[in-house]
Image: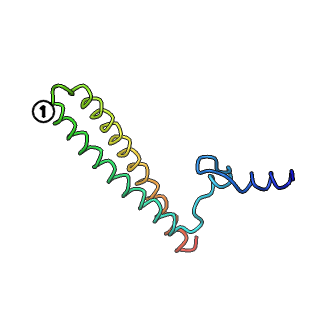
Amino acid sequence: MEDNKQARRKKHHHFFHRHKEEADEEPKDPEQELKHHKVLGHVSKATAVAAGAYALHEKHKAKKDPENADRHKKVEAIAATVAVGAGGFAFHEHHKKKEAKEKLKEAESGH
């Protein structure tokens, strides 16, 4: 019975509670790594644009709805923060993509 519980515990893990070995693994193939960072870069850029647009929308709402202006200003600040964070992540992924591209060229040249 005890072995069964341990087996279930090992099988069952959540996204946030992954084993350390799984979290440290990077894509083995340089092409997959390049594609991975390219996709994350696109997603983060889209998120930055969407959050920025939503922040501007809330700023406009704050002017048009003085009764709830405080709420709109708070939501605007949160959206602006998300936009800045997503922009920073896009910048990070851009550099990761450049590193992956260099690894791919290195692998193709045979060095």
Residue positioned 27% across, 28% down in the render: 71
Residue positioned 38% across, 49% down in the render: 91
Examine the image and state in which quarter residue 3 appears: bottom right
Find the residue positioned furthest to the front: 1
Find the residue positioned furthest to the left: 64
Q: Secondary structure at mark 1?
A: helix
Question: Measured along the vertical axis of the image, is residue 107 above or below residue 89?
Answer: below
Location of mark 1 (residue): 64
- In depth, the one of 55 and 45 nearer the eye is 55
Percent coordinates x, y for residue 25 in the rendering: 62, 57
Q: Is residue 70 left or right of residue 11?
A: left
Residue positioned 30% across, 37% down in the render: 80
Pointer 1: residues within 10 angstroms few (<14), some, or many (20+)? Answer: few
Question: Measured along the vertical axis of the image, is residue 84 above or below residue 66?
Answer: below
Kind of residue at disc 1: Lys
- In depth, the one of 107 and 58 nearer the eye is 58
Q: Quadrant of the C terminus?
A: bottom right
Examine the image and state in which quarter residue 43 appears: bottom left
- In depth, the one of 87 and 47 nearer the eye is 47
